[in-house]
Image (cartoon, grey):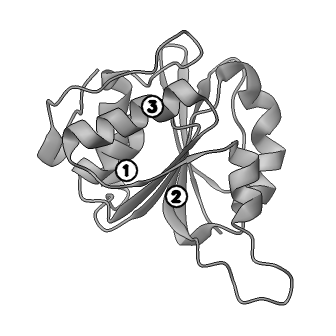
Amino acid sequence: MRVVGGTLGGRALRAPSGTATRPTSDRVREAVFSMLEAAGGVVGARVLDLFAGSGALAIEALSRGAASATLVDSASSAIAAIRANLEALGLEAEVQRRTASSFLAAAVAPEGAPAAARQYDLVFLDPPYRLAETLGPELSVALESVLAPRARVLAESDRRAPLALELPLVRERRYGDTLIRIYANR
């Protein structure tokens, strides 16, 4: 596994140990970023990578000019791999060991307070395939508070059990059994 493009193109990435994490393949990542480039690119974007795994998607975005990244995963092996990858590549990013739900809940401003400061222009969702189909409604509601105007959400899932969000679908592509969907904030 490697960084596909940008200033760090060709550099190796470490995957978490064990079989619980399924890193996005280089081929699919290359296609994803081609789609994102066609939709305005990632330069200057504030990126949130939920279910980050190795951190490959956020790292790819940073390599291509994203302004910042927050990587969230609940597995200690994933957090270790993310930190090792960031250190090896000389990148800085926020890394949090939490579930996606707890991260999103904490990002919501209390009632009566000004809008939450945590807003993202690009969100990557790559949950375990076995959970993706059931997460759509929960994530759709939880993401509302962190999406910047005109934000894009990229969801990766198995084509037989897709992650469907209640946001406008902009683009959809299949790569073997992998389904990539790009949604736009309303």
Earlier-in-chain disc, 3 versus 1: 1
Residue 76, horizontal then vertical, whole percent: 57, 29
Earlier-in-chain disc, 3 versus 2: 3
Quadrant holding the N terminus: top left
Check the image and report above or below for 155 versus 13.
Answer: below
Depth check, front residue: 133 or 97: 97
For the question of whether residue 54 can be seen, the reply is: no
- The extreme right residue here reads 111
Q: Residue at x 71, y 57 (%)?
A: 104
Q: Nearer the viewer, mark 3 or mark 2?
A: 3
* Residue underneath mark 1: 36
Q: Residue 18 vs residue 75: left or right? A: left
Q: Residue 64 vs residue 107: left or right? A: left
Q: Amino acid at mark 2?
A: Arg
Q: Quadrant location of residue 80?
A: top left
* Residue underneath mark 2: 152
Earlier-in-chain disc, 1 versus 2: 1
Residue 128, horizontal then vertical, whole percent: 65, 24
Check the image and report above or below for 173 versus 35.
Answer: above
Q: Amino acid at mark 3?
A: Ala
Residue 37, horizontal then vertical, whole percent: 30, 52
Image disc number at residue 109: none
Q: Residue 28 vs residue 178: left or right? A: left
Q: Nearer the viewer, mark 3 or mark 1?
A: 3
Tell me the CA gap for discs 1 and 2: 9 Å
- Tag 3–tag 2 contact (CB < 8 Å): no
Label 3 sits on a secondary structure element that is helix
Check the image and report above or below for 5 versus 66.
Answer: above
Q: Residue at x 31, y 58 (%)?
A: 41
- Tag 1–tag 2 contact (CB < 8 Å): yes
Image disc number at residue 80: 3
